[in-house]
Image (spheres, rainbow, N blue to C red):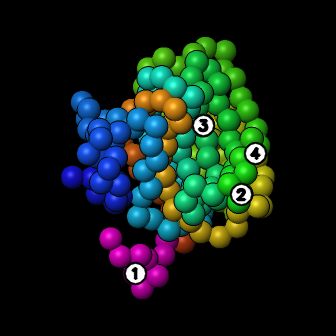
Amino acid sequence: KLYGCNPKHRSLQSGRIQLEGGSLRVDNERLQFNVDAEDVAIRATVKKLNGQNLALCVRDSGLTDHYAVWFNGGNFFGVGRAVSDQWNDLQNWRKGSAFPGFFDLVLSVQDDTLEASVNGEVILSVENDELPGSGGLAISTANGISLFSEIKMRYLGEAPSATDAPEH
């Protein structure tokens, strides 16, 4: 059972989202979590197997509006945003060495600052005010397969009160 998210029945049925060796195997799919947060960090241990990229998303209102940190494989990372379904890279980064196995990836947003970290090292930091307010969290893959494990979130501002928090 997956807690805190509602994968589409067809995604589970078709095997596009499945458990594999203690990780979530995500095949060209997006998995949204039942969280609504403004200032938040999402962390996962990830491994890209193939395809275009894997991503962690915050302030997510579905496919049309969100911030994301993405990993295209090798040593290529970026932070960007989608507004009204139009994608825009905000900043890219290349590390000297590749990441062929599992590594920790974090995306945090506080006020207008987005920050991405790999294995505890901040790799990207950018200011952007196009997506104010709260939204959900998601993991996704584009045109390929990736593994996600130990997916965690942390409120960076005030956590919603019990009366404000969505029911799970």
Q: Tell me how far mark 3 sits from mark 2, CA to CA.
A: 16 Å
In terms of sequence position, does the residue under pointer 1 or pointer 4 come before the other?
4
Say whether disc 2 or disc 1 marks the residue closer to the N-terminus. Answer: 2
Can you tell which mark lies on residue 162?
1
Amino acid carrying label 2: it is: Val
Which of the 4 quarters of the picture holds residue 153?
bottom left
* Residue 70: image tag: 3
The mark closer to the camera, 3 or 4, is 4
Magenta-highlighted residues: 159-168
Q: Is residue 162 magenta?
A: yes
Measure the C-alpha gap from mark 1 to mark 4. 35 Å
Judged by depth in the image, the label closer to the viewer, 1 or 4, is 4
Residue at screen point 59% across, 69% down: 134
**CB contact under 8 Å: marks 3 and 2:** no
Element marked by disc 2:
strand
Residue 168's place in the image compared with 153, above or below, is below
Task: Give me the disc on residue 88.
Answer: 4
Identify the residue at the far top of this view.
97
* Amino acid type indicated by mark 4: Asn
Q: Residue at x 77, y 55 (%)?
A: 128
Element on which disc 3 rests: strand
Dot 4, crowdedness within 10 Å: few (<14), some or many (≥20)? few
Within 10 angstroms of label 2, few (less than 14), some, or many (20 or more) residues? some
Q: CA distance from mark 2 to mark 4?
A: 8 Å
Q: Is residue 12 above or below residue 129?
A: above
Tell me the kind of residue under disc 3. Trp
Picture coordinates of residue 62, whole percent (x, y):
55, 59
Marks 3 and 4, the one that precedes in the sequence? 3
Secondary structure state at the residue bearing disc 4: strand
